[in-house]
Image: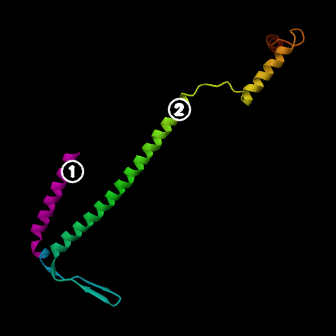
Amino acid sequence: MRYLKVLLLTLFFFVSMVFFIQNNEMLSNELVLKLELFNLNFVSHELPFYLIVLVSFVVGSVFSMSYFLAEKLRLSHELKSSKAKLAALEQEVTSLRNLPLEEEAYPSSASKAETAASTASYSDDSAPSYPEKKREEGVA
């Protein structure tokens, strides 16, 4: 990837040089830039056109690089905070995995225990056994 970037930069430089050499006469013309806002008038000195093109390119590059630098700093800060949050969550999961299992009466397990206790209190003669009940349902 690095070689491709260097190749593209070299190609861009080559095309730019050819452009300036072939258009040297036109680019050497002097220009005066004017800006009129309300009652204020701004007038530049006579500048060659190639200088205006080069300065515009450099200013655009500086603005682009500053934007991308700010974006990179923002993303690196976001990545750092995400990694810290991930580490905290992994630590929480690890601590929860290492907790001993406790025998607490939860509502669902308490109702199962009561059902088992109530069926055990019946005598064998008064309560039908479950396999017999299944056989009776299967016949009917």
Q: Nearer the viewer, residue 40 or 27?
A: 40
Instruction: Name above or below for residue 17 compared with residue 29.
Output: above
Mark 2 Cα shell of 10 Å, populated few (<14), some (14-19), many (≥20): few
Q: Residue under label 1, please give it.
A: 5
Q: Position of residue 33 (x, y in %)?
A: 23, 82
| Residue 18 lies within the magenta run | yes
Is 88 positioned to the left or the right of 99 in the image? left
Q: Main secondary structure of the magenta part?
A: helix
Q: Nearer the viewer, residue 17 or 100?
A: 100
On the question of residue 140 being in view, the answer is no
Magenta span: 1-25
On the question of residue 108 being in view, the answer is yes
Q: Nearer the viewer, residue 87 or 78?
A: 87
Question: Is the C terminus in the top left, top right, bottom left or bottom right quadrant?
Answer: top right
Label 1 – label 2 distance at C-alpha: 48 Å
Q: Position of residue 125 (x, y in %)?
A: 89, 8
Whichever of labels 1 and 2 marks the residue nearer the N terminus, that label is 1
Q: Position of residue 100 (x, y in %)?
A: 59, 25
Q: Residue under label 2, please give it.
A: 95
Question: Is the N terminus in the top left, top right, bottom left or bottom right quadrant?
Answer: top left
Q: Residue at x 15, y 72 (%)?
A: 50
Element class at badge 2? helix
Q: Position of residue 104 (x, y in %)?
A: 69, 27
